[in-house]
Image (spheres, rainbow, N blue to C red):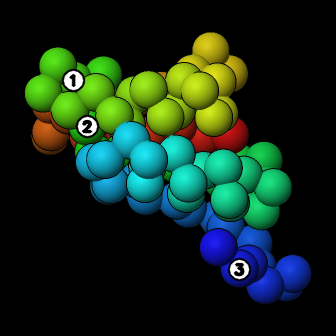
């Protein structure tokens, strides 16, 4: 993935199910995400789709995130870096 040098990612919404594709986004964009940026997830920590959780754990490190659930959706969550 070609990233422009001027690109800064303030919000990253991960909504890709196959593991190979899901880990590309944070891996490719991690250096472009500043502190206080938001990462939104649509299926983190679900039994139905585990790819998103695995990718976050392997690429970002799930232990480095403070993840909060949205009150209006059982699977929607976000983390502020």
Q: Which mark is residue 43?
A: 2
**Pointer 1: what residue?**
46
Q: Kindly identify the residue that appears in the image at 28 percent across and 27 percent down.
A: 50
The Cα atoms of the two marked residues, 1 and 2, are separated by: 6 Å
- Is tag 3's residue or tag 2's residue first in the polypeptide sequence? 3
* 3 or 1: mark nearer the eye: 3
Q: Which mark is residue 68?
A: none
Q: Would residue 27 be found to the left or right of residue 43 on screen?
A: right
Q: Would residue 5 be found to the left or right of residue 27 on screen?
A: right
Residue 72 image point, x, y percent: 14, 40
Question: Of 38 and 19, which appears nearest the observer?
Answer: 19
Q: Kindly identify the residue that appears in the image at 63 percent across and 34 percent down.
A: 59
Image quadrant in which you'd find residue 71:
top left
Q: Would residue 65 be found to the left or right of residue 15 on screen?
A: right
Question: Of 44 and 81, which appears nearest the observer?
Answer: 44
The Cα atoms of the two marked residues, 3 and 1, are separated by: 31 Å
Local secondary structure at mark 2: loop
Q: Is residue 56 above or below residue 22?
A: above
Look at the numbered discs 1 and 2 and tell me whether their residues touch, using CB distance below 8 Å.
yes
Q: Quadrant of the N terminus?
A: bottom right
**Pointer 3: what residue?**
2
The Cα atoms of the two marked residues, 3 and 2, are separated by: 27 Å
- Is tag 3's residue or tag 1's residue first in the polypeptide sequence? 3
Local secondary structure at mark 1: loop
Residue 23 image point, x, y percent: 52, 45
């Amino acid at each position: 993935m070609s990233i422009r040098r001027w690109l800064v990612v303030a919000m990253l919404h991960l909504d890709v199910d196959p593991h190979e594709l899901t880990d590309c986004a944070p891996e490719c964009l991690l250096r472009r995400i500043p502190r206080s940026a938001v990462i939104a997830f649509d299926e983190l920590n679900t039994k139905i789709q585990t790819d998103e959780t695995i990718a976050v754990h392997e690429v970002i490190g799930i232990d480095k995130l403070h993840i909060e659930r949205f009150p209006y959706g059982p699977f929607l969550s976000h983390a502020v870096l």
